[in-house]
Image (tube, grey):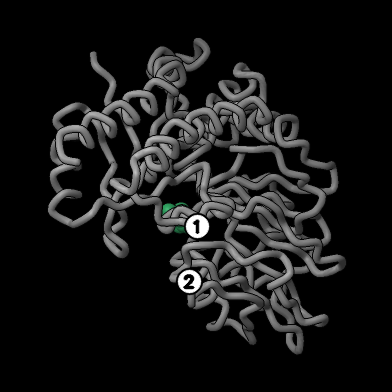
């Protein structure tokens, strides 16, 4: 079998070893005579899968004991609503950094729930950069500050985070979770859909400081309250058990590669190949994001005109590349180089880019 050079933005590439391990255990999980998918989520076997995935995450990401690790459903999009429902208090606005399409969606949901202010925006730069920390102005009575660490569509990424003191810092890390070490103790909540860096779709990771998961307003339905899930070890209702199991395999794979710091180095090596191909092309390829905000996860670039971009996509597909078309809202090209994308795929893309330039430059 030939594996595609998979640059999909999400769901995205998974390591071949992880897929093969899942395949081996697919029909008979640990001699149980059934698949993990057929098992009760109340069984000791599944409970162990759930607990192991959590403890691996704690270990790999350095999550302090005063944080809950929750495996929820509904995607990061549900978190856009759950966060203000649980944490936005009357008289204390929610502050958001407006950095592109995903921040925009989070802001729209928050506005439905309560007072929402924009603490910084890069709209006037077409969202092609992240704001500097000094541009972010948080009201002193804010319920929290929310930001999007990596804008998947624009291809921009925060390379440092603000110190918000007593105001909880809440970060959507859907497209860069576990791609680099972070100091979890600086955040109130970190959340991410799993389907880019952590595993398959279907499970949403929420890492939440315990004081924020304690007192959800009584008016919120049970499934949308953090305290419900925190109290029940993410087993309040039937969890996405197969996805959680896959996240566990993916975390073991990250561990086997040397952990998150090593993964960051791999990610840097991978993206350097492609950014070098852009920067060394004498303007044939143009990176979209401003250099200081370039993402290590989503590399966005353009060619001289749309015809040439279409040709690039068509010819790259014929060579086994997948997922290089930019998001429909912005056009152009995008290579998503998440944790599981192998170096070889990036080497092949850099070579293809050089070859394509020779033919069309
Ligand atoms: C940064 C970011 N936030 C949120 C989402 C939405 O995630 P979900 O599809 O899990 O709701 C995405 C999806 O691509 C994303 O990239």
Q: Quadrant of residue 257?
A: top right
Are the residues tagged 1 and 2 within 8 Å (C-beta)? Answer: yes
Left or right, 14 with respect to 291, comes to left
* Quarter the C terminus occupies: top left
Q: Considering depth in this image, is 277 or 204 the residue closer to the camera? A: 277
Left or right, 283 with respect to 145, comes to left
Where is residue 251 shown, x and y percent of the image? 59, 28
- Looking at the picture, does residue 146 appear above or below residue 209? below
In the rendered image, which residue does mark 1 sit on? Answer: 290
Sort mark 2 into few (<14), some (14-19) or many (20+) by Cα contacts within 10 Å: few
Q: Residue furthest front?
A: 282
* Quarter the N terminus occupies: top left
Where is residue 227 shown, x and y percent of the image? 72, 60
Query: Secondary structure beneath disc 1?
Result: loop
Q: Residue at x 17, y 56 (%)?
A: 306
> Which label's residue is closer to the chain start, 1 or 2?
2
Where is residue 17 shown, x and y percent of the image? 45, 16
Sort mark 1 into few (<14), some (14-19) or many (20+) by Cα contacts within 10 Å: some
Q: Residue at x 44, y 46 (%)?
A: 298
Q: Residue at x 38, y 45 (%)?
A: 9
In the rendered image, which residue does mark 2 sit on? Answer: 125
Where is residue 39 shown, x and y percent of the image? 48, 29
Left or right, 322 with respect to 147, comes to left
- Looking at the picture, does residue 10 appear above or below residue 315? below
Numbered badge on residue 345 = none
Q: Considering depth in this image, is 196 or 319 the residue closer to the camera? A: 319
Query: Secondary structure beneath disc 2?
Result: helix
């Amino acid at each position: 079998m030939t594996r595609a050079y998979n640059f999909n933005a999400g769901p995205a590439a998974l390591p071949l070893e992880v897929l093969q391990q899942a395949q081996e255990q697919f029909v008979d999980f640990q001699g149980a005579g059934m698949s993990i998918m057929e098992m009760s989520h109340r069984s000791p076997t599944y409970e162990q899968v759930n607990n192991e995935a959590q403890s691996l995450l704690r270990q790999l990401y350095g999550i302090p004991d005063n944080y809950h690790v929750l495996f929820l459903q509904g995607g990061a999009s549900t978190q856009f609503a759950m966060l203000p429902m649980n944490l936005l208090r009357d008289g204390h606005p929610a502050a958001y950094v407006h950095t592109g399409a995903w921040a925009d969606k989070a802001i729209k949901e928050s506005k439905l729930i309560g007072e929402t202010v924009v603490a910084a925006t890069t709209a006037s730069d077409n969202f092609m950069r992240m704001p500097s920390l000094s541009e972010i102005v948080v009201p002193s009575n804010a319920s929290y500050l929310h930001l999007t660490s990596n804008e998947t569509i624009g291809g921009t990424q925060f390379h440092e985070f603000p110190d918000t003191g007593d105001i909880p810092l809440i970060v959507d890390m859907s497209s860069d979770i576990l791609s680099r070490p972070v100091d979890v103790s600086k955040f109130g909540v970190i959340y991410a859909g799993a389907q880019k860096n952590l595993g398959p779709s279907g499970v949403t990771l929420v890492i939440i400081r315990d004081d924020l998961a304690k007192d959800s307003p009584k008016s919120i339905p049970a499934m949308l309250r953090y305290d419900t899930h925190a109290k029940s070890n993410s087993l309040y209702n039937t969890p996405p058990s197969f996805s959680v199991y896959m996240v566990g395999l993916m975390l073991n794979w990250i561990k086997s590669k040397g952990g998150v710091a090593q993964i960051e180095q791999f990610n840097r090596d991978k993206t350097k190949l492609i950014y070098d191909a852009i920067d060394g092309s004498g303007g044939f390829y143009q990176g979209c994001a401003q250099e200081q905000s370039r993402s290590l996860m989503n590399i966005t670039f353009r060619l001289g005109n749309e015809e040439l971009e279409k040709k690039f996509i068509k010819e790259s597909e014929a060579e086994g590349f997948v997922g290089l078309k930019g998001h429909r809202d912005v056009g152009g090209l995008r290579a998503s180089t998440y944790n599981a994308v192998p170096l070889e795929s990036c080497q092949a893309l850099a070579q293809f880019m050089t070859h394509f330039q020779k033919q069309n430059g």
